[in-house]
Image (cartoon, grey):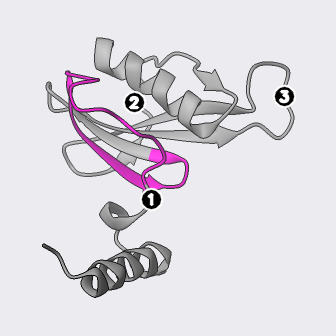
Amino acid sequence: MTDPTLDTLTQRLDHERDRSPFATKKEQHMPINVAPGEFPNVIEIWGVGPNAIEVTTQHQRWIRITARRVIRGPRGGPYYAHYEERTAAGVWGVNPLQTFPWQDGPTTEHCLRAALAWVNERA
């Protein structure tokens, strides 16, 4: 049996940590919910902000997906996926040898989920 006071304190500390400007990227809010086994070729998913995730694939590729908000544009949206890949030197940037598809959605979660499905299948 757990102590209810301890549970309340733990919840409050978790809430404060998530709001802290000093929280590490691994402690921040996860912008999507992913069930275990849902994307089998993706071995790690980290929430790095309210609209971005970083994933590691089984082929040891590190990809950051950001759901960017379209302020004014002709198609889709209001969010579209922007992809960056981490090099062996640890630098993030757009990989000129990899063409990522246009993925969009009405919410950050829809956009990130569509991009994550593509990464799971092809990256």
Residue 5 visible (yes or no): yes
Q: Three-letter amino acid code at disc 2? A: Asn
Residue 123 visible (yes or no): no
Tell me how far mark 3 sits from mark 2, CA to CA.
24 Å
Tell me how far mark 1 sits from mark 3, CA to CA.
28 Å
Please report the residue visible at 82 percent of the width from the left and 41 percent of the height from the top: 71
The residue segment tinted magenta is 30-52
Q: In this view, does 11 lie above or below 54?
A: below
Q: Nearer the viewer, residue 68 or 114?
A: 114
Tell me how far mark 1 sits from mark 2, CA to CA.
27 Å
Query: How many neighbours does mark 1 have within 10 angstroms: few (below 14), some (14-19), or many (20 or more)?
Result: some
Q: Name the residue under label 3.
A: 73
Please report the residue visible at 36 percent of the width from the left and 81 percent of the height from the top: 8
Q: Position of residue 75 (x, y in %)?
A: 79, 18
Q: Mark 1 points at which residue?
A: 29
Q: State which quadrant residue 73 falls in.
A: top right
Judge left or right: residue 10 versus residue 114.
left
Q: Mark 2 points at which residue?
A: 95
Quadrant occupied by the C terminus: top left
Q: State which quadrant residue 40 falls in.
A: top left
Q: Where is residue 101 in the image (x, y as percent from the top left)?
A: 52, 15
- Is residue 43 one of those drawn in magenta? yes
Q: Three-letter amino acid code at disc 3? A: Gly
Whichever of labels 1 and 2 marks the residue nearer the N terminus, that label is 1
